[in-house]
């Protein structure tokens, strides 16, 4: 799973550059503000993806605790 996460993160990083290069070839110099915006959104997405298992594990623990309290 860790290897898949690393490959996915590198693919998204590479596709961000490819998308920026494609937009620059289509629109010319009019695309200057797109780079920092793509980087910012990619950073937020990668941090959220990294922290997602913490929230999922916490919710699973809560569901198990409630199930144990109500049905045990």
Image (cartoon, rainbow, N blue to C red):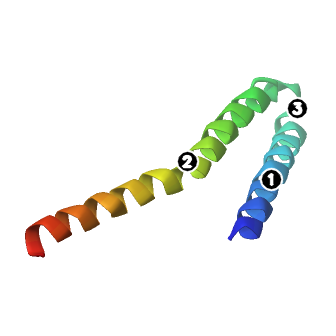
Please tell me whether mark 3 or mark 1 is closer to you in this view.
1
The Cα atoms of the two marked residues, 2 and 3, are separated by 37 Å
Q: Which residue is mark 3?
A: 28
First along the sequence among labels 2 and 3: 3
Crowdedness near tag 2: few (<14), some (14–19) or many (≥20) residues, C-alpha within 10 Å: few
Up the image or down, 33 lies above or below 64; here it is above
Pinpoint residue 41: horizontal percent, then vertical percent: 64, 37
> Which numbered disc, 2 or 3, marks the residue closer to the eye?
2
Q: CA distance from mark 1 to mark 2?
A: 22 Å
Q: Categorize mark 3 by other alpha carbons within 10 Å: few (<14), some (14-19), many (20+).
A: few
**Residue 14 spot, x, y in % from top left:** 85, 52
State the residue position of label 1. 15
Q: Position of residue 47 (x, y in %)?
A: 62, 42
User: Counting other residues with Cα less than 10 Å from the Cα at mark 1, is it few (<14), some (14-19), or many (20 or more)?
Assistant: few
Q: Verify CB contact (< 8 Å) between mark 3 and mark 1.
A: no
What residue would you read off at disc 2?
A: 51
For marks 1 and 2, the one nearer the N-term is 1
Sequence-earlier tag: 3 or 1? 1
């Amino acid at each position: 799973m860790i290897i898949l996460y690393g490959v996915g993160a590198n693919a998204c990083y590479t596709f961000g550059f490819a998308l920026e290069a494609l937009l620059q070839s289509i629109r010319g110099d009019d695309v200057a503000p797109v780079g920092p915006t793509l980087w910012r959104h990619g950073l937020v997405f990668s941090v959220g993806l990294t922290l997602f298992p913490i929230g999922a594990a916490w919710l699973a623990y809560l569901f198990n605790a409630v199930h144990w309290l109500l049905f045990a």
